Image: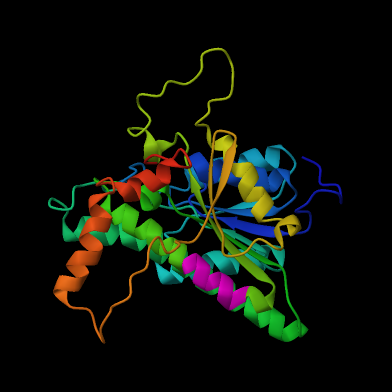
Amino acid sequence: MSHPLSLPLDGLSAIVTGAGRGLGRTEALELARLGASVVVNDYGQAGRDGSGEASAAPAQEVVEEIRAAGGRAVAHLGDVSDHEQARSLVELAVDTYGKLDILVNNAGILRDRMIFSMTEDEWDSVIRVHLKGHFNTTHFAAVHWRARSKESGGPVYGRVVNTSSEAFLAGSAGQPNYAAAKGGIVGLTTSTALALAKYGVTANAICPRARTRMTEDVFAGFQEPEDGRLDPLAPEHVSPLVGYLASPAAARVNGQLLVVHGGMVAIAERPRVAAKFDSSKEAFTFDELDELLSPYYADRPPNETFAAAEVLGLKRG
């Protein structure tokens, strides 16, 4: 993995969280292939629910893969949901490579349960790792970029790529904590995009569909090809988009949500007004709302919110 000057991420440094396995691993490898020096973060717990002892092995194995191919990488064993450990992650990137240019937030856990069965801890833990974890790393990266911009008197290079999910777009009955966290990540992303644009930083979110430890039950019925073709659900379909969003080529892409899987990228629009009703009086009455809204919804399918996602061919993921 030599790094000629023509590589799009040459001279840039990146953090990828949750990069010991699955999507994060392929994203770290792709950023390194494109020329970036990478900090590979993973807490290394064995269970996808966040159970098991923390281990440096998953992150270190990815580091070794990158180094074996000629790239630069260091490992970080840390829980991004912990504010101080997120600070140390950003500091490691700056101390090792002189600056941070790219942040890819991917770390997460699952604790699935129907809303009527979910415990407070199952809710809190998933929100903490996904949503707070994204906030923690983004906060410290933003502090770094803002300080650099003030010091230089102009914009700097900064890219944030966050990981949302189709569970937020299309709903996921058994994942109220996960769907809520992934929706919150979209809100965090658009807010970050607006706040950091003047410093030269972009922030975007992706909704990836891929066969990983996190989704093994979701895609259990979809068999991998046996003829040597790339699995349509392989994480390798997702990582090129992350590499693009992290690159100078994506300078005009900011505050966007992109769905990606199996050789497809779809750009999701922000919600649009589907219908508008005005009161005939100073304020609506119950009867007037009943007359206007009830017929409108009576003519529509009961799961219209899910039907809207089907336009893009989306399902839970």
> Predominant secondary structure in magenta?
helix
Residue at 66%, 49% in the rendered image: 243
Q: Which of 242 and 147 lies nearest the eye of the viewer?
A: 242
Q: Residue furthest front?
A: 280
Q: Quadrant of the C terminus?
A: top left
Q: Position of residue 9 (x, y in %)?
A: 75, 54
Left or right: 220 with respect to 4?
A: left
Residue at 64%, 58% in the rendered image: 14
Residue at 25%, 55% in the rendered image: 297
Q: Is residue 63 magenta?
A: no
- For the question of whether residue 171 can be seen, the reply is no
Relative to residue 53, is residue 144 depicted above or below?
below
Q: Position of residue 28 (x, y in %)?
A: 60, 47
Q: Is residue 194 magenta?
A: yes
Left or right: 155 with respect to 267?
A: right
Q: Quadrant of the N terminus?
A: top right
Q: Position of residue 267 (x, y in %)?
A: 56, 51
Relative to residue 232, is residue 170 depicted above or below?
below
Relative to residue 252, is residue 303 depicted above or below?
above
- Report the magenta residues as a range: 188-196
Q: Which of 34 and 40 lies nearest the eye of the viewer?
A: 34
Residue at 63%, 38% in the rendered image: 65
- For the question of whether residue 11 can be seen, the reply is yes
Q: Which of 151 and 175 lies nearest the eye of the viewer?
A: 175
Q: Which of 44 and 175 lies nearest the eye of the viewer?
A: 175
Q: Residue furthest right?
A: 5
The quadrant holding residue 102 is bottom right
